[in-house]
Image (cartoon, rainbow, N blue to C red):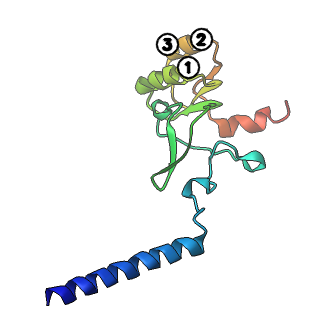
């Protein structure tokens, strides 16, 4: 009985090996998962794209961090550009956001209607960053539209 079981096992092993060899022969043995193009790869050619991301606060911005899609790394953050940091906070907390905006190189800081912090205004403008305080952009754009 043992001889029969070993004979059956060796025959099953040979069949499995032949099936694997056949599958490899039919596939051409040159499939490489690393040759598949992934979005965000090093060479996108004409298919480059920009991604606009909004963060809860500016401290969440991290240069050189990886970019993942479904937990697969597809690139990295290479540059961060911040045009305007628009602050909708109480006046007592708004200065911290102005300081963060200056630290990340924002081009301007805007404190909404009712948000006033003169110390933050002084620090921000001394750093060379234009700042608007206690003003609503929706009200200002029509007035500035003719400029």
- Badge nearest the viewer, 3 or 1: 1
Q: Residue furthest left?
A: 1
**Quarter of the image that includes the C terminus:** top right
Q: Residue at x 64, y 12 (%)?
A: 128
Q: Residues within 10 Å of mark 3 (few under 14, many from 20)?
A: few
Q: Residue at x 71, y 34 (%)?
A: 140
Whichever of callouts 2 and 3 sits on the residue coming sooner in the sequence is 3
> Which residue in the structure is indicated by mark 2?
127
> Which residue in the structure is indicated by mark 1?
102
Q: Position of residue 83 (x, y in %)?
A: 65, 31
Q: Residues within 10 Å of mark 2 (few under 14, many from 20)?
A: few
Q: Residue at x 78, y 32 (%)?
A: 144
Q: Give the vertical position of 119 relative to 138 (above or below).
A: above
| Secondary element at image label 3 | helix
The answer for how far apart the CA atoms under marks 2 and 3 are is 12 Å
Front-most of 65 and 104?
65
Decide if residue 136 is on the left or right side of residue 3. Answer: right
The answer for how far apart the CA atoms under marks 1 and 2 are is 7 Å
> Which residue in the structure is indicated by mark 3?
119
């Amino acid at each position: 009985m043992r001889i029969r079981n070993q004979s059956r096992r060796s025959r099953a092993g040979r069949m499995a090996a032949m099936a694997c060899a056949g599958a490899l022969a039919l596939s051409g043995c040159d499939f490489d998962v690393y040759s598949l193009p992934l979005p965000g790869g090093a060479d996108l050619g004409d298919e480059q794209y920009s991604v606009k991301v909004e963060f809860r606060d500016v401290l969440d911005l991290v240069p050189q961090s990886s970019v993942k899609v479904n937990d697969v790394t597809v690139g990295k953050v290479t540059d961060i550009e911040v045009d305007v940091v628009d602050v909708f906070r109480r006046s007592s907390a708004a200065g911290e956001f102005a300081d963060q905006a200056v630290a990340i190189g924002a081009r301007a800081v805007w404190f909404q209607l009712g948000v006033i912090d003169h110390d933050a205004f002084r620090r921000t403008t001394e750093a060379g960053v234009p700042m608007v305080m206690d003003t609503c952009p929706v009200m200002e754009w029509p007035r500035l539209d003719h400029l």
